[in-house]
Image (cartoon, rainbow, N blue to C red):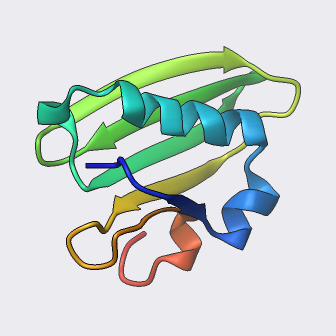
Amino acid sequence: MFDNQRYLTKGVNESIPFELQAFMWDCIDRLPEDKRDYFQVFELKDIGGMQHIVHFSEQPEYCMNYFIPMLKAVTAKVYVIDSTEYYSIKQMEMSTSHSGRS
């Protein structure tokens, strides 16, 4: 899972700094295979100039918090979906570009 080509939406590309994009992909890459769900969520928050990142999935249940010093922290929710079963792609997208979820 999550071992094929990677894509991201225009919203992620324009709103999320490259360093955070790379960090989120790396968080997924470091997960043991038994902890990887096809649907990963990252909640990004600006907390006093620190980038707070909550990375979680529901099945299997997983949650990890990170704090990273950043000059311009971002507040957003990002979904990363591995659609290998149907499309052979994985995609990083902002929550506002994913219908049916908030």
> How far from the left and from the top, in percent, is residue 100?
36, 82
In percent of the image, x 64 and y 69: which residue is there? Answer: 9
Answer with the quarter of the image where residue 81 lies: bottom left
In percent of the image, x 34 and y 49: which residue is there? Answer: 2
In percent of the image, x 18 and y 33: which residue is there? Answer: 33
Answer with the quarter of the image where residue 61 lies: top left
Number of numbered markers: 0
Q: Is residue 28 above or below residue 85?
A: above
> How far from the left and from the top, in percent, is residue 53?
53, 31
In percent of the image, x 67 and y 27: which residue is there? Answer: 51
| Relative horizontal placement of residue 18, taking residue 92 as reference (left or right) | right
| Relative horizontal placement of residue 17, taking residue 39 as reference (left or right) | right
Q: For the view shown, which residue lies furthest in the right direction?
A: 71
Q: Quadrant of the C terminus?
A: bottom left
| Relative horizontal placement of residue 10, taking residue 92 as reference (left or right) | right
Answer with the quarter of the image where residue 39 lies: bottom left
> How far from the left and from the top, in percent, is residue 6?
52, 57
> How far from the left and from the top, in percent, is residue 94?
58, 64
Q: For the view shown, which residue lies furthest in the bottom direction?
A: 99
Q: Nearer the viewer, residue 33 or 79?
A: 33
| Relative horizontal placement of residue 21, taking residue 90 as reference (left or right) | right
